[in-house]
Image (cartoon, rainbow, N blue to C red):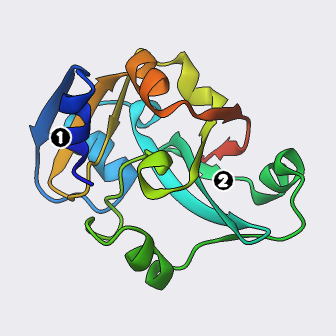
């Protein structure tokens, strides 16, 4: 699924920016000169056999225990890179867009992102970033809002 075409088809305003390849969400923030709190980092987990895309700020990590509790799950784990290749065949590994619904999974958005006016994320490539109004993102993706992250110090 081409994310840019999807945004165009849904008449969503966005800015596409190119930069040197960035392989972490924090490096995207630096390349785009924005706060790590504005970069929407996708992390895929598997809870009781079901895939979920967790979307959180670049400068945060997923608290699996908090997430397990909020999902009412027994088993929860991060999805290994080999599995990511299968889930996102059209994306460069690590450049998946934070839109789980496009890949058949529920999107969970950390509430800390709901404070921001805009979000920046990769759309399948390490050298491109999309900037989108956060409300437009929420209207398009319809994420389930939870609290599951902690800030890296």
Closer-to-camera residue (26/76) = 76
Quadrant where the image shows the N terminus: bottom left
In this view, 21 is above or below 10: below
Query: What residue is drawn where x is 30% and y is 51%?
Result: 27
Q: Mark 2 points at which residue?
A: 62
Query: What residue is drawn where x is 26% and y is 22%?
Result: 12
Q: Where is residue 133 in the image (x, y as percent from the top left)?
A: 34, 19
On the rendered structure, is 13 left or right of 48? left
Q: Position of residue 99 (x, y in %)?
A: 43, 45
Closer-to-camera residue (32/2) = 2
Q: Where is residue 140 in the image (x, y as percent from the top left)?
A: 42, 28
Count of numbered labels shown in the rendering: 2
User: What secondary structure is marked by label 1?
Assistant: helix
Query: What residue is drawn where x is 61% and y is 28%?
Result: 112
Q: Mark 1 points at which residue?
A: 5
Closer-to-camera residue (153/116) = 116
- Sequence-wise, the earlier of marks 1 and 2 is 1
On the rendered structure, is 125 left or right of 69? left
On the rendered structure, is 45 left or right of 29? right
| Residue 33, visible in the rendered structure | no
Given this view, does label 1 or label 2 mark the residue nearer the observer? Answer: 1
């Amino acid at each position: 699924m081409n994310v840019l075409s999807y945004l165009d088809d849904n008449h969503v305003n966005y800015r596409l920016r190119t930069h040197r390849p960035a392989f972490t969400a924090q490096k995207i923030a630096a390349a785009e000169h924005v706060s790590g709190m504005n970069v929407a980092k996708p992390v895929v987990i598997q809870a009781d056999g079901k895939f979920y895309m967790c979307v959180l700020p670049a400068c945060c990590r997923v608290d699996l225990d908090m997430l397990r509790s909020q999902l009412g799950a027994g088993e929860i784990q991060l999805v290994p890179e080999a599995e990511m290749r299968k889930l996102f065949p059209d994306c460069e590994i690590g450049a998946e867009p934070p839109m789980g619904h496009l890949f058949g999974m529920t999107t969970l958005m950390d509430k800390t992102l709901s404070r921001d006016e805009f979000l920046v994320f990769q759309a399948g490539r390490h050298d491109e970033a999309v900037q989108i109004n956060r409300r437009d993102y929420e209207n398009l993706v319809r994420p389930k809002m939870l609290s599951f992250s902690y800030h890296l110090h």
